[in-house]
Image (tube, rainbow, N blue to C red):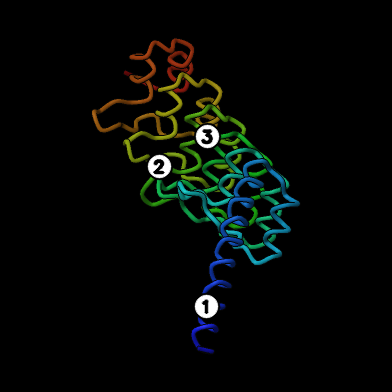
Amino acid sequence: MHRILQAAVISILCYTGSIAYGQAYVDLLKAAREGDAKTVQRLLDRGLDPDTADSNGNTILMLAAQLGHKDLARLLVSRRASINKRSPHGDTALMMASLRGDMEITRMLVDNGAELNHAAGWSPLHYAAFENRAEIVRYLIGKGAEKDALAPNGYSALMLAARGGHVEAARALLYDDVDLKVKGPKGETALSIAQDRKHSDLVELLKRAGAVE
């Protein structure tokens, strides 16, 4: 009888603990999305993992980078959150910060060891060029980003900028002498992409830089 009662008590304690953890997990994700660094710190002090991820596989550091929560990002870096952890889609916190154009978080992550180049896959530079984040483009190249690396779709950063008609990002890339002759999977170049999409300002910029048809 005593053993049965003991097992019942243990079961109740485990169940209660599970509920408490579940609520703490919900609270942590809510605080991360809201940029509530104080609440996140309190929950981390209670033992929650700084690499906790949401149902989509995005860690709370990725959420901080994606949403521009600088104080939260700083806290998580100080708590040794995994900076180079990837989401199921292959994104990192740095890629999200680059896509957003958040220079402060981008610098913070790079200064703490964030990877600039990915052997196979999208890179922070690709994301920055895609969204016309010229300042981020210049910074990443200055830190060693591979300026002519190809994304999974076969496009270089310059070609991605051309696709969107992003003159400022293209200018930043051209300043660092990117390869104008890089071709995509169908033989397209940055110039031909800009021409096909009728981005006249970008066509002119590329031709001045030496691009030829």
Q: Secondary structure at mark 2?
A: loop
Residue 139: horizontal and vertical position, in percent? Answer: 61, 40
- 10 Å crowding of disc 2: few (<14), some (14-19), many (20+): many
194 or 209, which lies in front? 194
- Asked whether disc 3 touches disc 2, contact meaning CB atoms under 8 Å apart, the reply is no
Q: Secondary structure at mark 1?
A: helix
Tell me the number on the disc at residue 149. 2
Seen at 76% across and 51% down, the residue is: 38
Q: Which mark is residue 181?
A: none
In primary-sequence order, the first of circles 1 and 2 is: 1
Lower sequence index among marks 3 and 2 = 3
Percent position (x, y) of residue 178? 45, 34
Relative image position of residue 103 (x, y in whole percent): 65, 38
Q: If the image is split into quadrants, where does the C terminus sit?
A: top left
Give the Cα separation between the discs numbered 3 and 2. Answer: 13 Å
Q: Quadrant of residue 140?
A: top right
Question: What residue is at 43 percent from the left and 17 percent from the top?
Answer: 207
Name of the residue lying farthest toward the left: 186
Q: Residues within 10 Å of mark 1 (few under 14, many from 20)?
A: few
List the residue tagged with mark 3: 128
Three-letter amino acid code of the residue under disc 2: Ala
Rendering coords of residue 2 (x, y %): 54, 89
Judge left or right: residue 18 versus residue 72. left
- Residue 101 versus residue 144 in the image, above or below: above
- Does residue 155 appear left or right of residue 11 in this picture? left
Q: Which residue is disc 1 drawn over?
A: 8
Q: Could you tell which of marks 3 and 1 lies nearer the N-terminus?
A: 1
Q: CA distance from mark 3 to mark 1?
A: 56 Å
